[in-house]
Amino acid sequence: MNLNLSNFNENTKIIKGHDNISEVKEELAVNGKEITGPPKIRIDNVKKIFKTKNNKTSKIEDFIALNDVNLDIYKGEFLVVLGPSGCGKSTLLDILGGLSPASEGEVKIDDNVITEPGLDRGIVFQQYALLPWRNALKNVTFPLENNKKDAESEEIARKYLALVGLSSFEDRYPHELSGGMKQRVAIARALAIDPEILLMDEPFAAVDAQTRAILQEDLLKITENTKKTVIFITHSIDEAVFLADRVAVMTARPGTIKEIVNIPFSRHHRIATDFKNNSDFISLRRRVWDLLKEEVIKSQEITEKRIKFEENENIDGGGI
Ligand SMILES: Nc1ncnc2c1ncn2[C@@H]1O[C@H](COP(=O)(O)OP(=O)(O)O)[C@@H](O)[C@H]1O
Ligand SMILES: [Mg+2]
């Protein structure tokens, strides 16, 4: 399918807040995704306030990181959250992971409110977070050890190390692995508990560009074959448009969902064709950049204002 910018606008619907399910059904059908039920994950009016101490006045102030975040994610979907640095992406992922509570609102998985981490969610962070004293195999067995015997844990770990292409590296320790390999081990570890949902926070940000491109392709194949629902966070537009079934673009802090852009191509198409070099990709990238650009500028202004505020004792303020 070849899409120029004029018919691209017709084919790409943008939805705010909660989705109209039948519209999303139509959209995701184009990506080869069949939606059969209600959203797997529902983020409802989520707000996150951090209490921070003002160094000048010693007063505790509210720092609003997220405001009124509404988002539905469907079973089997690969949803990318894209936003400028500091807009609250990791804060949102921590809430989804049950690592930190929302100040207001709630997140539901299959209609159950998240209150803590669970085996239904595997998390991959930007920093590899591997245990340095354990080899690759034993890093992957780690989350299984409470519930399974050693031999069974190792069999499962080997299966997932094979899936990420690291069968012959199971004895290697983290310091003996490249950045890309470490992140493959982290992905194998997240998959080993066989979670329905994979939460990924800029997992490829620290690896070189060539390795990143290969990891992206492999991740698309693995998540398609294992039928995971994925929420993947990034600040890279190219990564978002390549990986996503839908891209949720966030505003500058306090972060909220600005718009959702459908990427109307199947994962197979994205992998099998030279998608990143074709005109459809370039049109979509431009569309997403148009949405993100003003948020990046705003985000820089907020940071500059904050630095000035902290440098200047006489300015009375707050809520910056
Ligand atoms: N524990 C915390 N206490 C106070 N402020 C925090 C805390 N965690 C994050 N923040 C602030 O919240 C904002 C959003 O952070 P984060 O979610 O890490 O952004 P992103 O992942 O989009 O770069 C940032 O301004 C950050 O400094
Ligand atoms: Mg972050």
Image (cartoon, helix red, strand yellow):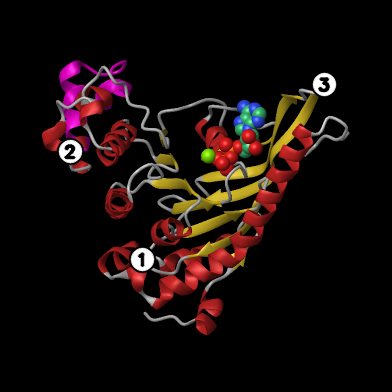
Quarter that holds the N terminus: bottom left
- Secondary structure, mark 3, is loop
Report the front residue among 303 and 232. Answer: 303
Q: Residue at x 31, y 21 (%)?
A: 131
- Residue 266 tag number: 1
Q: Residue at x 31, y 38 (%)?
A: 183
- Identify residue type, mark 2: Leu
Of marks 2 and 3, which one's residue comes earlier in the chain? Answer: 3
Image quadrant in which you'd find residue 144: top left
Q: Visible in this render: residue 37?
A: no
Dot 2 alpha-carbon crowd within 10 angstroms: few under 14, some 14 to 19, many 20 or more:
many
Q: Is residue 141 magenta?
A: yes
Whether the residue under disc 3 has CB within 8 Å of ligand 1: no
> Which residue in the protein does label 2 denote?
166
Dot 3 alpha-carbon crowd within 10 angstroms: few under 14, some 14 to 19, many 20 or more:
few
CB of mark 1 within 8 Å of CB of mark 2?
no
- Identify residue type, mark 1: Ser
Residue 39 location in percent, x, y? 53, 49
Q: CA distance from mark 3 to mark 1?
A: 52 Å
- Identify residue type, mark 3: Lys
Q: Which residues make up the magenta segment?
A: 140-160
Residue 60 location in percent, x, y? 79, 22
